[in-house]
Image (tube, grey):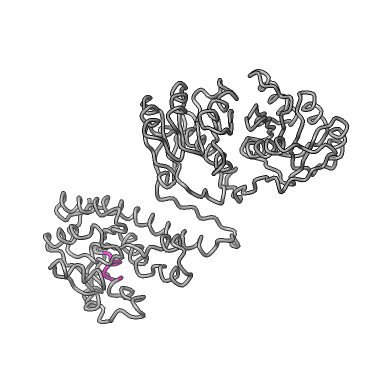
Amino acid sequence: MNNKTISSALISVFSKDGLEPIVKKLNDLNVTIYSTGGTEKFIKDLGIDVVPVEDVTSYPSILGGRVKTLHPKVFGGILNRQNHDGDVAELKEFDIPQIDVVIVDLYPFEKTVASGASNQDIIEKIDIGGISLIRAAAKNYADVTCVSSVDDYAEFLDLLETKNGETSEEDRKQFAAKAFNVSSHYDSAIFNYFNQNHEIPSLKISENKGKVLRYGENPHQKGFFFGDFDEIFTKLHGKELSYNNLLDVDAAVNLMLEFKNDAPTFAVLKHNNACGLAQRDTLHQAYLDALAGDPVSAFGGVLISNTEIDVATAEEIHKLFCEVVIAPSFSDEALEILKGKKNRILLILKDIEMPQTNVRSCLNGILVQDRNNITDTLEGLKPVTKTTATSNELDDLIFASKICKHTKSNTIVLAKNKQLCASGTGQTSRVDALNQAIHKAQSFNFDLKGAVMASDAFFPFPDCVEIANNAGITAVIQPGGSIKDQLSIDYCNENNVAMVMTGTRHFKH
């Protein structure tokens, strides 16, 4: 078992939160405590004996505290192998104390970066002594216990109390694994700060918060989520989110951010695509018109609003089986209504910025790209036809373009009066996408006369504008850029269809 009884401990921490009960328990177990600086004072103020590291090294803290524990007598006490006769002899020869426990945390580098501090302040929060102590103690887990985070204090205290100061090799190995998690995450954060422009072609991703999901995309697949969910949402009610829930929630949030601070807007999503979306004077009407876009697909969907959900809207939502409802807030009465279904997940979306980088697995590696931060605007539109779009058509074109940007390619979006009529999603042919959208819109009794069409990429031939025109569509928005753009323009000119180009493609694979 290779059990060890703790007889000495080195404690040097930035944060003292939660440290007191550990120090008192170590003292009760007659453990010799070594410490430095502020931690040493903290322990003395508790009335507990502590040996300054300077008394061990015969060397003061120098360079404004940059060098305190970086000394052979400290690291020799940590790295020696207790079953190695040569190491034991050298400890005695050089008067090096045996150290059984190292309790240390690291300067708050990430918090300092996030605070907007100056470069110099950030550099000073790159820990040297602490990270070295963690690596040394974790490496020598055969003899040493390394407690590297405030998050592990409770577990360590429980170990002291239940085992009366004795540790097994398995205990120490588990703490070592936690320590290397801390050190690798810390170094990744530092590297990413220095490599913000990706000049070094290396990717470091480290997430310390993770949870096991019920399963992955299908029940036979394992699933995990790594990230700080609570940074983005406050969960008010419902069951645990699944892998597929999280994908749909991600799609919903990214889509609705396009309508942030707009008039009341409501969207219904299924399999990462909007199946209904409308913008109205009231949220209640926006929900009803979003639902009308595809009431069949809405079953079991994810719902999202850009404004507080009120009683009238909640009463309508409550009639529908849906997995998740997301909003910036819920009125008290609306919340009570929606809590009527015990499994319905209710989330408050906080005022956040989404990550500026998209990451996904590919083959035996990873694809990384910048977030698609371009949203088409009225000012950026280039009219290319003799017929010009009306004011209402222009508003609908921008509305449709926002939806198109967040719909799987190839995609065509049809909209009218700021209501999604239908989308053709994930098709291998743009003509198929258009025909799918028209068929779907007509199946739900939408009158497409005067509707608009958005395409996520250019038209290589005029067939799409011809099909759209025959269905009653009067205005089109597309990126342009085909060598045969003029063919589509000519058709529109001959048939009084307005077309604008954006110059920006919005593929979403």
Query: In this picture, is 179 found above or below 219?
Result: below
- Specify whether 22 is left or right of 464: left
Residue 219 in view (yes/no): no
The residue located at (57%, 28%) in the rendering is: 290
The residue that appears at 44% across and 68% down in the rendered structure is 122
Quadrant into which the C terminus falls: top right
As rendered, which of 401 and 110 lies closer to the eye? Answer: 401
Residue 471 visible, this orientation: yes
Which of 72 and 441 lies nearest the eye of the viewer?
441
Q: Is residue 138 left or right of residue 392?
A: left
Q: Is residue 80 magenta?
A: yes
In percent of width and height, residue 443 lies at: 65, 18
On screen, residue 290 above or below 235: above
Q: Who is closer to the viewer here, 17 or 156?
A: 17
Residue 223 location in percent, x, y? 45, 36
Query: Residue at coordinates 47% horizontally, 28% vertically from top-left?
Result: 313
Left or right? Give the position of 382 relative to 134: right
Return the x and y of residue 177 as percentages of the image width and height: 35, 53
Where does the image place residue 87, in percent across and percent down from the top left?
27, 69
Residue closest to the eye, 193 or 266: 266
Q: Is residue 270 above or below residue 227?
A: above
The quadrant where residue 40 appears = bottom left
State the extent of the magenta-drawn residues as a range.
Answer: 75-81
**Residue 291 is drawn in which quadrant?**
top right
